[in-house]
Image (cartoon, rainbow, N blue to C red):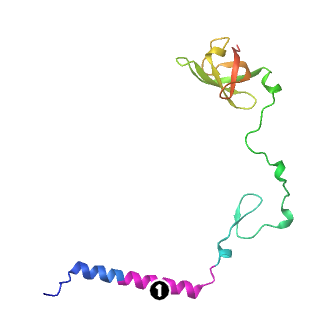
């Protein structure tokens, strides 16, 4: 039986494999020789203005914050706040489906409204007055009246 012949592509692949192994070994030796790269060199800090720096913050400028003072989740609404009359502008209203959204004048909050809760016919960009009421899926605008 004869010796298998080595083609040109097999020789090139073998040379590339050997070169890759040598390059990897060379990089490994360079890392060992340069060696002072530690985790401390890679740390970045954020100062009181939100800028990234390489110097640690001054402990004297640190603010003490109690865990109890940090609000979690969305703030709850006061029940008294829902009874008063509010004003806003209709940002979107789909007459075929009968619902839309009102942007509150004070809080710029978007509030859902349904045609069943309207006293007057409304359209987009109309100024309206309304009250808030808790619905099945959140706060809804009720008693919606167009302001002339």
Query: Which element is circle 1 on?
Result: helix
| Left or right: 142 in relation to 71 | left
Q: Within 10 angstroms of label 1, few (less than 14), some, or many (20 or more) residues?
A: few
**Position of residue 58 measured from the top left corner of the image (x, y, whole percent):** 82, 67
- Does the magenta-highlighted stretch encompass residue 19? yes
Please report the residue visible at 77 percent of the width from the left and 35 percent of the height from the top: 76
Which residue, given by chain and number where applicable, does mark 1 sit on?
A: 26
- Does the magenta-highlighted stretch encompass residue 93? no
In the image, residue 29 above or below residue 99: below
In this orientation, which residue lies closer to the viewer: 51 or 4? Answer: 4
For the record, the magenta segment spans: 18-37
Please report the residue visible at 85 percent of the width from the left and 62 percent of the height from the top: 61
| Left or right: 21 in relation to 131 | left
**Position of residue 87 measured from the top left corner of the image (x, y, whole percent):** 74, 22
Looking at the magenta stretch, what is its main secondary structure? helix
In this orientation, which residue lies closer to the viewer: 23 or 1? Answer: 1
- Judged from this view, the residue extending furthest toward the left is 1
**Position of residue 45 measured from the top left corner of the image (x, y, whole percent):** 71, 66
- The C terminus lies in which quarter of the figure? top right
Q: Quadrant location of residue 93?
A: top right
Please report the residue visible at 68 percent of the width from the left and 19 percent of the height from the top: 127
Q: Quadrant location of residue 117?
A: top right
In the image, residue 103 above or below residue 32: above
In the image, residue 132 above or below residue 47: above
- The N terminus lies in which quarter of the figure? bottom left
- Judged from this view, the residue extending furthest toward the top is 120
**Position of residue 98 measured from the top left corner of the image (x, y, whole percent):** 57, 18
Tally of numbered discs: 1
């Amino acid at each position: 039986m004869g010796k298998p012949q080595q083609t040109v592509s097999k020789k090139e692949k073998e040379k590339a494999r050997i070169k890759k192994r040598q390059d990897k070994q060379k990089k490994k030796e360079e890392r060992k020789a340069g060696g002072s790269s530690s985790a401390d060199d890679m740390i970045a800090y954020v100062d009181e203005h939100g800028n990234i720096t390489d110097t640690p913050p001054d402990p004297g400028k640190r603010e003490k914050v109690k865990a109890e003072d940090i609000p979690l989740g969305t703030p709850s609404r006061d029940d008294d706040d829902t009874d008063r009359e509010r004003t806003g502008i209709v940002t979107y209203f789909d007459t075929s489906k009968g619902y839309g959204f009102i942007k509150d004048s004070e809080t710029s909050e978007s509030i859902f409204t349904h045609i069943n809760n309207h006293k007057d016919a409304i359209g987009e960009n109309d100024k309206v007055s309304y009250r808030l009421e808790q619905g099945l899926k959140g706060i809804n605008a009720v008693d919606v009246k167009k302001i002339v």
